[in-house]
Image: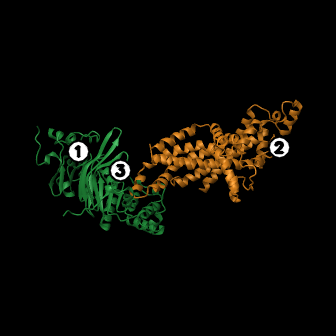
Chain colours: A green, B orange
Amino acid sequence: MEEQYLLKVDNLHTHFFTKTGVVKAVDGVSFSIRSGETLGIVGESGSGKSITALSIMKLVPNPPGRIVEGAIYYNGEDLMSKSEKQMRRIRGNKLSMIFQDPMTSLNPVFTIGRQLVETVRAHRDLSKRQAEARAIELLTLVGIPDPKQRLKNYPHEFSGGMRQRVMIAMALACDPELLIADEPTTALDVTVQAQILELLKRLQEELGMAIIMITHDLGVVAEICDRVMVMYAGRQVEFTNRIALFDHPKHPYTWGLLDSIPKMEKEKRRLQAIAGHPPDLRYLPQGCYFADRCKQATEECKMHEPTLTKLDDHHLVRCLLYEDIKVEST
Amino acid sequence: MINYIIRRLLLLIPVFIGVSLLAFSLLRLIPGDPAKSMLGNKATAAQLQSLRLELGLDDPLPVQYKDYMEDVFQGDLGYSIKSHDSVLEEISTRLPATLELSVVALIFAIVIGVLAGIISAVKRNSWFDHVSMTGALFGVSMPIFWLGLMMIWLFSVTLHWLPPSGRLSVGVHLQLITNIYLLDSLLTGNWQAFKDSFEHILMPALALGTIPMAVIARMTRSSMLEVLNQDFIRTAHAKGLAKYLIIFQHALKNAFLPILTVIGSQFGFLLGGAVLTETIFSWPGVGRYVYQSILSRDYPVVQSTILIIAVLFVLINLITDILYKYFDPRIRYD
């Protein structure tokens, strides 16, 4: 029997219908996540990470965006068949999300107390007083000192790191089973980044929720993720566990990503950036999308689209280098 | 905050002096002689001269100004050259009429304008958006006097739905307290008078409120569109909040600052626009009074009314500025 997944995304296609053409932001992504697990989604800007997350929440701005194909199962229930009203009951409740920029993600004209209380009361039948007590509890949980007083403060009276803690508190309001964190540390100072990651790790241990961590920072992956999905141009190019990703990365794009991180222990050398740009998602090339930037690319790569190949139980890769049956060029 | 309000109120003094000086000198720059307009063309030079002497019109301008300001600061706004009535008394019965008209016009403008703007923003590019924004364009470009006359023609002359002029029908009695008829009829529980005065105010208020309504609608739409694209709106959706809460609380409160600015400045416009509206609908307010006084070169009336309207305008701006703080807690006044 198949293992029970908390969330299973199957062949997700989210496209944006713009005046200049169809942008295939997410184009056939499949993955799943178990309770209590942390899944990393890694990739450059525009690789489709955030849109994947928004698709799960069914918050893709429509128009122009739309999920054109695929299925999303949450606790065995198909989210695609849920109405907006039903989705609203799930969002912020069992499935919650935090965003990249805590400066702009909180409403500047309401106190954080009000913003926490309304989240709690949107999903729980609590009085204002009870919801306030819950808000204080949440702020304590995320390590905000003097929570009772802080409820009366507005977002601009907090530092960036503190705001992200408030965002996390808000996401945890109803004990979510899955927290989607869309680059939660990107906009923060390095020292604060570490604190927020620590906090997420601690909360996960205490509350047992699953986390989808969207990031372009492999350092974050090393810190917190169990499994990692690498995305490129709207598709997953490699999917494996953290150890395999760092020890035996398979996809040339992953190599590139790893090469572009500075390492302390190695001798000084120039950081290797991946040359070129990701393809325009409106005019995707034939063959492998990464072929233009890939040092290993052959003529074949530009002709034939690689499929996601299973190397072993824990490793999937989309690259002709690993396809068992090589397509002969004719 | 208190300090800020006191500071702003102190600023009223220079504004007061400036406006009075301006009104005083502008009036005397325009051609025309109050003595002549009072006595008519057949008056002799001696009669005219003696009247000028009596009114102090032959004093040097600085002396006239000084005398006038001295009186004003003692609460004496002078007497109408024409009717010899106390200007203060005249204004105190007419100002409530103008305020009532302006406030009702503004309420129409805000309620309809903000609602249309919100719906247009939320349903961008829908038929509603196109219709209401085209309507707003017409509204902005419509001269009040033309719109007013068309309304009278349609609703009074042709359809006989609404009275064409005045504040209250003959035969309807109302005990006056504040001189604001809608309020007075509510205070005295006089429903007949309330209905009647509402029917009287409906057309002039709509005519007067059309331009502000259109301006408010367009501002609301653009401000809401900007706010609806903000990250915190996405957060609100991600929290599972109901859509109406997101639009009417999260988005509207953020979008309201520019709308409030427009409302504040439109109120000043309403006080000015009242001159036309009151003339067309024979509304016994300050606007019509000023208009008639300008025609007869009734210096004290025009000067004093301009002063009062200027002070009102400054006070409204102060209230707007204080309200900013409610809509955006990031605003600091120190």
Image quadrant in which you'd find residue B19: top right
Whether discs 2 and 1 lie on one chain: the answer is no
- On screen, residue B137 versus residue B56, left or right, reads left
The residue under label 1 is A272
How many angstroms separate mark 2 from mark 3 (CA)? Answer: 72 Å
- Chain designation of label 2: B
Q: Secondary structure at mark 3?
A: loop
* Quarter of the image that includes the N terminus of chain B: bottom right
Residue A120 lies, with reference to residue B19, above or below; the image says: below
Type of amino acid under label 2: His
Camera-side residue of A137 and B136:
B136
The residue under label 3 is A60
Depth-wise, is mark 1 or mark 3 nearer the camera?
3
Q: Secondary structure at mark 2?
A: loop
Of all residues shown, which one is farthest toward the front? B159
Image quadrant in which you'd find residue A125: bottom left
Res. B11 visible in picture: no
Camera-side residue of A3 and A235:
A3
- On screen, residue B163 versus residue A45, left or right, reads right
Instruction: Check contact, mark 1 vs mark 3: CB within 8 A.
Output: no
Instruction: Check contact, mark 2 vs mark 1: CB within 8 A.
Output: no
Image coordinates of residue A133 in percent, x first then y, are 44, 69
Image coordinates of residue A110 in percent, x first then y, are 48, 57
The residue under label 2 is B84
Whether discs 2 and 3 lie on one chain: the answer is no
Camera-side residue of B59 and A27:
A27
Mark 1 or mark 3: whose residue is earlier in sequence: 3
Depth-wise, is mark 2 or mark 3 nearer the camera?
3
Image coordinates of residue A39 in percent, x first then y, are 26, 58
How many angstroms separate mark 1 from mark 3 (CA)? Answer: 34 Å
How many angstroms separate mark 2 from mark 1 (CA)? Answer: 92 Å
Q: Residues within 10 Å of mark 1 (few under 14, many from 20)?
A: some
